Amino acid sequence: MQKLLNSPDDLEQLRRVLLAITDLKKPAVALCGSTGCEALGAKEVIKAFKEELKKQGLEGKVDIKETGCLGFCEKGPRLIIHPEDIAYFRVQASDVPEIVSRTLLNKEVIERLLYIDPTTGLPAHHLFDVPFYKYQNRLLMDNNAKVDPKNIEDYIALNGYKALAKVLSQMTPDEVMTEIKKSGLRGRGGGGFPTFQKWESTRRASETPKYVIINCDEGDPGAFMNRALMEGNPHCILEGFLIGAYAVGSHEGFIYVRQEYPLAVENMQDAIEQATAYGLLGKNILGSGFDFEVKIHWGAGAFVSGESSALMTAIEGRVGEPRPKYVHTSERGLWDKPTVLNNVETWANVPLIITNGGEWFAGIGSAGSKGTKIFALAGKVNNTGLVEVPLGFTLRDIIFKIGGGIRNGKKFKAVQIGGPSGGMIPEQYLDVPVDFDELKMLGAMMGSGGLIVMDNDTCMVDVARYFVNFLCEESCGKCVPCREGLKQARKILTDIISGKGEENDIEKLRQIAEASNAAALCALGQTSANPLLTTLRYFAYEYEAHIKEKRCPALSCKPLITFYVDPAKCNACTLCSRNCPVAAIDGAVGKIHIIDQDKCIKCGTCFEACRFKAIQKISGQPVPLPIPEEQRVRKPVKRGN
Amino acid sequence: MSLEKTEFSEEIDRIIDKYTGEKGVLIQLLLEMQKELRWIPKEAVMRINQRLKIPVSEIYRVASFYTALSLKPRGRHLVRICLGTACYVRGGTRILDSVERLLGIKPSETTSDSRFSLETVNCLGCCALGPVIELDGQYYGRLTPANLGELLSKYK
């Protein structure tokens, strides 16, 4: 068993030993083992590597490391070959023998596994030649590629826990607070509340004991940066947590993780056990006399539990409902004691601030929002994944430079930021710098940083209904405007997308939104109006088309669209009819196809299957009658002829 | 009042044993119960009430509030369809429609042969791979309605 580290010198000694025994020239394969890549077959790739190395007699001569998420999930499973730092994407188990014999043994690069820049057509050999990474500033995410989250020594070798050692041996809590204040760090979980202020009120509160909490309830759909950090580099979060606990005078902490993240919990549990074994958690940490203990608490699936006061009642074992906040949780939180609750990403920033100084941190970002922020880029964009950029970066650069633009050459329509409490931002505001204050002015908010890109095929009324429905299901039911108002809003929106909208619906929606904003107790209820208000503000014409013309401009709302085979384009090849799940398409080889509108369930399978663009979506106008039986003759042509 | 012994009794008591004497355990206890038994039977509620002196009303309140806890028996395999925003705009509802059609059940229902239970989930955090579903803890990404049948047939 590892000897306890009794002082900062012991830690430094261990780090030197670790560096000395590391052979930088030894070939190593670092493969992403996080949930995203696992879903794409990373486990099989690792297994294949182990088998292949054994087969070729290379066991022990090549290191295999499972690392955390590097963000470019779109092209997973991803691996990096050291020491040459060659990055391969979309690797499958069947590629492994070739990688071992060609790249590991003969140092050849396999071109087809490299990333090809779609604009230049040139391959990128190294990770940072890939445009997705080139424009990022990965202060938090970078180590995800370097450490095995299940091995504390990887983290220690990269100067891990050095900030903690510095704090415990050379800094008073006051000095830590000064650095945090200078840094200008604001909470990454949503509201952007200054971290210094939160900590300071808990520190000054007279009651004891004091608690600290890591919020990893990441309930915003479309956000997964907390999962990636906790899966990929749990020790960096723990280190920040310990520093915060020391600053505010807390000796007991909780980590609240949603139950949808089993791997994050597993890795964090391992991290806690290892840190305890090394003397970095528990009693008398690094010989400083400071004690700290951590417990993990599983969430049970409730969006509202991410709200700070609700999360605390959930840790107490009760139903997670928010409470009024005229008394701040920083003074009376968990079990009515002073409690600091911060998001995973906020805690992860703390060691960086201590290591490099508050002023250094304040030098990154925009006037009011400092440091970097991880955004989860998803939806209809080419490069989906996690993107870390300095605050103040523009949405346009994130979506087009890093994200590589819109999929399938379609046109950008809006980007949804901030989860269900955020808003939809249209094209004309894409050049606004993304920071906490600018987004508020647009009627959206940072939230946890989910960015969902939507193209012209996305109906804004349907998306508004999606969020209202989400909030309806997740409302805890305590306040009337949220509980009842959202239900009415959902009914009106459902009517609109079903072609039953009425003239004064828009006005009614506005009133409901304003009431909830003014009268709900917690931030979730108050901001529940944002998706409605921003779509009404920027996409009013879509609402009007649904209500007045019974037409869905995005051709997406099922009750308002009809699928139709254009006889002029139909190749009579039966591809669509063979794929139709309900046998609604009549036709044969050589016989132009017709959709039976009574049978059609509008699933869109035929639309995707057809290679001749013969299937059309029609909205707001009558469907043409089927052509007469005798005219349904067509000799199919082979594709490409 | 003593309770009749059932197939679950031993398991229930064993789980409760782990949580006696600690504060604020109800949610964690119910989550473990859910994991081991795949649902929260009435017997579990009554045993928790008896042994930990937590009111039955409070146990039911917690069990019905959280989506991870089920008061009905679940099937052998749990299909969870992600309807987070990213999956939604990439066709998550079409995946849901297809699974509903293939299994003949709606969300929060179980097939009559107890093979599958179907649920929707707000976000699995694999947004880059949408639409995503989770089958007994295993994630599957980049799905289309066409390849679902084959996937489901692997789960007997």
Image (cartoon, coloured by chain):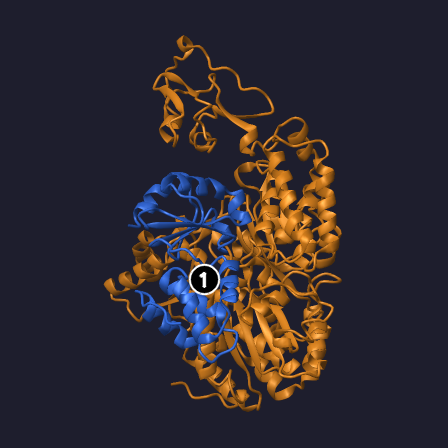
Chain colours: A orange, B blue
**Residue lying furthest front in this view?**
B1
Q: Amino acid at mark 1?
A: Asp
Question: Residue A198 at what x, y percent from top left?
Answer: 70, 72
In the picture, measured across the screen, residue A287 lies left or right of residue A48, that is right
Give coordinates of residue B125: x percent, y percent.
50, 56
Task: Work out whether A386 lies above or below A572.
Answer: below
> Where A541 falls versus A206 (above or below)?
above
SS for dot 1: loop
Residue A343, horizontal then vertical, whole percent: 60, 66
Front residue of B88 and A170: B88
Which one is in front, A43 or A115? Answer: A43
The answer to which quarter of the image holds residue A187 is bottom right
Nearer to us in this view, A421 or A404: A421
| Residue B38 in the image: above or below residue B133 | below
- Name the residue tied to disc 1: A85
What residue lies at 62% left-to-right and 69% top-to-bottom?
A342
Image quadrant holding the N terminus of chain B, namely bottom left
Q: Position of residue A186 (x, y in %)?
A: 68, 66
- Which picture quadrant has residue A426? top right
Which quarter of the figure has residue A462?
top right
